[in-house]
Image (cartoon, grey):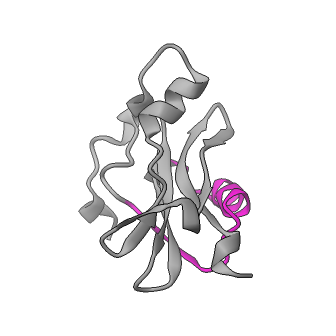
Amino acid sequence: MKNTDLNIGPYFWINNKLIFNKCSLSEGRKQFDKIDNSYAHEKLYDDYFKVGDYIDYPRGRVVWDMTKNEAVIYIDRCINKHDILTKIIEVFNLRKYRVEYDEHYRCKNCMDWSVEDEF
């Protein structure tokens, strides 16, 4: 599989469903040593829901690490489960990847932990 086959972008896990926006690497934007989809979680949430706040829900983002030549799956710790990761990997067409936590991707129920608690 070529890197051009994979996708990057934000996602949510809401009501046992993966909600996402994806684009190819060639459509992404370079930020330092990563390629990212510029679509914001706020916009993605508003595309599907008219009430509530996106920050209440588990979320993450898939980006491409140009230095390590692999995808990074940023994920809220409460949804870091095999079945959910499998769906993310399938939807974004990932082969080589690593999973990381980032304080940007925490739902309201996970706000009391820090990334350092996990490692």
User: Which residue is drawn at the image coordinates 48% and 41% (left, top)?
Assistant: 58
Q: Is residue 79 above or below residue 56?
A: below
* Residue 96 % position (x, y): 61, 80
* Residue 82 % position (x, y): 66, 61
Q: Is residue 57 above or below residue 90?
A: above
* Residue 82 left/right relative to 51: right
Q: Quadrant of the N terminus?
A: bottom right
* Residue 15 % position (x, y): 65, 31
- The count of marks equals 0
- Pick out the residue farthest to the bottom: 68
- Pick out the residue farthest to the front: 26
Q: Which residues are magenta?
A: 79-101
User: Which residue is drawn at the image coordinates 44% and 67% (left, top)?
Assistant: 35
Question: In the image shown, does 116 or 72 lie closer to the viewer?
Answer: 72
* Residue 44 % position (x, y): 53, 35
* Residue 78 left/right relative to 24: left
Q: Quadrant of the C terminus?
A: bottom left
Would residue 23 be counted in the magenta stretch?
no
User: Which residue is drawn at the image coordinates 71% and 71% (left, top)?
Assistant: 5
* Residue 110 found in image quarter: top left
Question: In the image shown, does 102 or 34 lie closer to the viewer?
Answer: 34
Would residue 98 be counted in the magenta stretch?
yes
User: Which residue is drawn at the image coordinates 34% and 64% (left, top)?
Assistant: 118
